[in-house]
Image: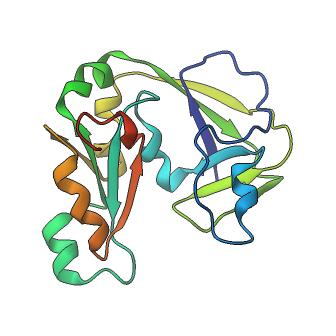
């Protein structure tokens, strides 16, 4: 298994644990997830972070419990979909981000959308610069869907799909 961290910073020699910037409501006994940690994503879910840092996006994929009709309606034959607002497309085409590969030792699987955390300092194994982010999705079986607004997609959370919303506070009319 491969673990990654994505950043716009090309010069990270080591990742130090730090608390999340925007603490979330966590289930009892998981409050520690707002504390100082190093976050990573597994290779299967790395498409969630192929965006400029502040880019709002909604990502969907089927789970074993997703009804077949919803899977067909929202995904068809693709593995996953990533929705992004149209005005972010120029930045997806122009910006470069850096994918740091991290050693798996010391990381704990959260059992949620490929997320892993470490409580100690992590030194990356390798850094890869990625440009033309808009071209990175199709090879991963993910369809990049460009929309004028993410707001009409709020109802996705009422489906049987897995739905992740990242940086939605930056969406134009999210509320």
Determine the residue positioned at 66% across, 37% down: 101
Determine the residue positioned at 78% across, 43% down: 36
Identify the image quadrant of the N terminus. Answer: bottom right
Q: Is residue 76 visible?
A: no
> Is 94 left or right of 120, judged from the image as shown?
left
Determine the residue positioned at 48% across, 53% down: 45
- x and y, in percent, of residue 23 in the image: 61, 47
Relative depth, front residue between 21 and 43:
21
> Is 165 left or right of 46, judged from the image as shown?
left
- x and y, in percent, of residue 22 in the image: 58, 42
Determine the residue positioned at 76% across, 32% down: 15
How many numbered callouts?
Answer: 0
- x and y, in percent, of residue 124 in the image: 74, 32
Q: Is residue 175 visible?
A: yes
Q: Outermost residue, right direction? A: 120
Q: Residue 163 occupies which quadrant of the picture?
A: bottom left
Identify the image quadrant of the C terminus. Answer: top left
Q: Residue 134 occupies which quadrant of the picture?
A: top left
Is residue 124 placed above or below 142 in the rendered structure? above
Please name the colour scheme applied to the rendered image: rainbow
> Is 174 left or right of 169, judged from the image as shown?
left
């Amino acid at each position: 298994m491969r673990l990654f961290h994505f950043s716009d910073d090309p010069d990270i020699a080591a990742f130090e644990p730090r608390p999340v910037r925007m603490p979330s409501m966590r289930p009892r006994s998981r409050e520690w997830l707002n504390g100082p940690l190093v976050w990573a994503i597994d290779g299967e879910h790395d498409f969630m972070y192929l965006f400029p840092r502040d880019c709002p996006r909604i990502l969907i994929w089927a789970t074993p419990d997703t009804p077949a009709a919803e899977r067909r309606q929202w995904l068809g034959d693709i593995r996953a979909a990533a929705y992004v607002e149209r005005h972010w497309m120029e930045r997806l085409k122009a910006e470069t981000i850096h994918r740091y590969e991290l050693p798996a030792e010391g990381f704990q699987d959260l059992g949620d959308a490929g997320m892993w955390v470490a409580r100690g300092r992590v030194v990356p194994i390798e850094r890869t610069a990625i440009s033309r982010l808009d071209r990175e999705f199709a090879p991963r079986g993910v369809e990049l869907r460009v929309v004028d607004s993410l707001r009409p997609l709020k109802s996705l959370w009422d489906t049987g799909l897995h739905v992740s919303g990242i940086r939605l506070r930056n969406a134009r009319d999210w509320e």
